[in-house]
Image (cartoon, grey):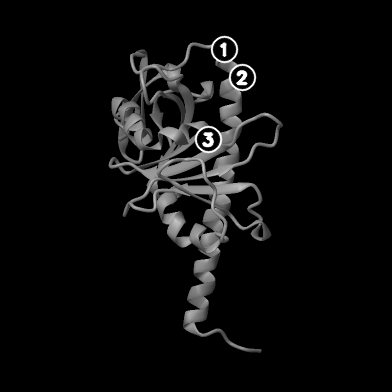
Amino acid sequence: MSLQTAPERASSHSLGFNLAGIAALVLLGAVGAAYLVDSLGRGARVTPPSLADGNTISQTISGQELSIPTAWFRHGEQIKPGFTNQIDLRVMFQPEPESAPLPVDVALVPRSRARTSAVLLDTVYLHQFGDEMVQGVPGLVGKPMGESNGYQGETVWYDALSPNPFVAKCVEPVATGASSQCVRTVYLSSGIAATYAFDATALQSWRQFDAEMERWLTKIGAW
């Protein structure tokens, strides 16, 4: 029986960690897409969240106390004060005053429970790209993930010119006529990680995306 050398064991551990990260991100993407579909279905019946919303409750996550309007919560059972390890919210992305707002589902978790999309670009995604490129989002490079590795229908969009790039992974819709859904994870300066799930049409305004999310999350003390 052959014995692994130390570099081989480290490589195996790194591969396992990367695969775990992929699985976690795929799960977040699937959950985020499901929540987004649900939000679109309820959007016609419920007043969308607003930066002017009041009626807040206090929740503490990663040692950070947040003051959150109850209208922002995706799930009614989460509307209670106290300590928590995950907060699921719904905010709106409206990059221009005349543009139609798009719902963005936000999952806030401790930083230790997530890896950013920018980190995954370097450690996972780049090793799964083929030679093809996808056009359609000015300023972003679109690279399909390798279908042979189980990533069929998934495309990563990223800003190739930035040292801390905007990165989002998008999944083709299952239903005919639906649009692709995207997931982006970032670390906030508060020590919280935020995972955004949103409609792929928002990528056309990707330069405004993080600034708009900062407006919402600053209001509650999460940024």
Q: Do the residues labelled 3 and 1 touch (CB within 8 Å)?
A: no
Q: Name the residue carrying label 1.
A: 44
Q: Circle 3 — which element?
A: helix
Residue hosting label 2 = 41
Distance, label 3 to label 1, CA atoms, is 20 Å
Query: Does 116 sit above or below residue 70?
Result: below
Return the mark for residue 145: none
**Residue at 60% in and 24% down:** 38
**Which quadrant, please, contains the N terminus?**
bottom right
In the foreground, 166 or 136: 136
Badge 1 element:
loop
Q: Nearer the viewer, residue 11 or 191?
A: 11
- Residue 149, position as x, y percentages in the image: 65, 60
Residue 106: x and y in percent read 45, 33
Which amino acid, by three-letter code, is at mark 1? Ala
Asked if marks 2 and 1 touch (Cβ < 8 Å), the reply is: yes
Which of marks 3 and 2 precedes in the sequence?
A: 2
Looking at the image, residue 210 lies above or below residue 55 = below
Q: Is residue 160 above or below residue 17?
A: above
Dividing the image into 4 quarters, which one contains the C terminus?
top left
The residue at the point 69 percent across, 37 percent down is 174
Label 3 vs 1, first from the N-terminus: 1
Q: How far apart are marks 2 and 1 (CA)?
A: 7 Å
| Real-space CA distance between mark 2 and mark 3, rounded to the nearest whole angstrom | 17 Å
Give the residue number, with chain letter if any, for mark 3.
200
Label 2 packing within 10 angstroms: few (<14), some (14-19), many (20+): few
Q: Is residue 101 visible?
A: yes
Residue type of the residue flagged with mark 2: Gly
**Amino acid at dot 3:** Ala
